[in-house]
Image (cartoon, rainbow, N blue to C red):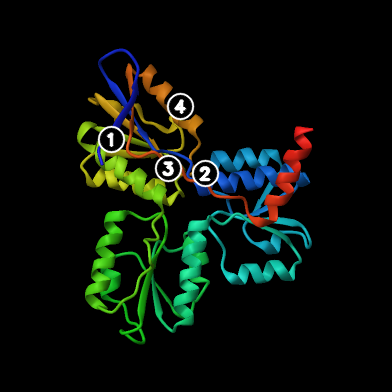
Amino acid sequence: MPLKPLAASNGGGKKILLLKPRGFCAGVVRAIDVVEIALELYGPPIYVRKEIVHNKHVVERLRQAGAVFVEEVGEIPEGARAIFSAHGVAPSVRHEARKRRLQVIDATCPLVTKVHLEASRFARMGYSIVLIGHKDHDEVVGTLGEAPERTFLVSSVEEVDALQVPDAEKVSFLTQTTLSLDETSHIVARLRERFPSIQGPPAQDICYATENRQMAVKAVALFCELLLVVGSQNSSNSKRLVEVAQNAGVASYLVDDAAHVDPAWLAGVNNAAVTAGASAPEHLVQSLVNWLRECGFQTVEELELVDEDVRFSLPNELSQPAAQLRIISAR
């Protein structure tokens, strides 16, 4: 699908190609809303297991508002109010939270929950589960916890070649939601070669936002010499955007914000593309655009691949209290 020009500023010379969609996806918006609404409803402290989303600027802003970020639920006082991050948790974490009588609000992205449900279903059917993903990523750790004795993690074609499963006729596969589309397709193709009867999810696990942002990068690759991706270093989907551009022959860098751009990267560049990972706030993108303007990029052209209009409802633990809060606020 070709990119559609949205708007361009006047002027010629060096150009910024601003990709859309970019930045926050529906799951990230929902997760941040969960923390903000919980703080408004109940006041601080609100405890959050792990980073609510993988962006240090977002986490720091919420920390200043009263959120307390911890690594494990064992660090949360018994009976306190706790939020699970957008990346999901293993059943063992939920069990420990119940033991500690925590008042849990689950901000797991619904698309991650979909993968957890698929893992549980395949496990009940007696399948070995091949999970395609990156070791130690929070989302992968949570999904592995659904059926640890039946799940095999792979991240490359070579690991598929070395894979040994109990029954080659009862194999399934799932994927992390934030992977490279191209890399994942190669791994799935090799799995199908090795295990012709392998079962997969009814619809791909890689989320719509990850796919849209990668496709936009591919579409603009022919028209730019540089791609800057706004996102934190622990953001999987942001890293994949850099890889997609580099695989297309475009110099690409992941930056937390404008302060992390090396001016040397701009040497000889006439067209610089800018996008953002799914957990990066828009104000960081605009700050980067303004900085590039100061560096001599006079024109900004926004290019749209697809119009994203996805919304996720609040978790059940918050939907009714939040509705009551809105009623009170309106009076």
Mark 4 crowd level (few <14, some 14–19, many ≥20, 10 Å Cα): some
The reply to whether callout 2 and callout 4 are in contact (CB within 8 Å) is no
Q: Between disc 2 and disc 4, whose residue precedes? A: 2
Of badges 2 and 1, nearer the viewer stands 1
Q: Quick one: SS at disc 4? A: helix
Q: Are marks 3 and 2 in contact (CB under 8 Å)?
A: yes
Q: CA distance from mark 4 to mark 1?
A: 20 Å
Viewer-side residue, 28 vs 148: 28
Query: Relative to residue 56, is residue 125 depicted above or below?
Result: below
Q: Nearer the viewer, residue 313 or 286?
A: 313
Q: Are marks 4 and 1 in contact (CB under 8 Å)?
A: no
Vertical position of residue 254 compared to residue 182: above or below: above
Which x, y percent locates residue 232?
47, 43
Residue under label 1, please give it: 3
**Which residue does the numbered mark 3 point to in the structure image?**
277
Dot 1 lies on which element?
Answer: loop
> Label 3, label 2: how many angstroms apart (C-alpha)?
9 Å
Name the N-terminal-most of marks 3 and 2.
2
The residue identified by callout 4 is 286
Which quadrant would residue 181 be assigned to in this image? bottom left
- The amino acid type of the residue labelled 4 equals Gln
Residue hosting label 2: 55
C-alpha span from label 3 to label 4: 14 Å
Badge number at residue 143: none
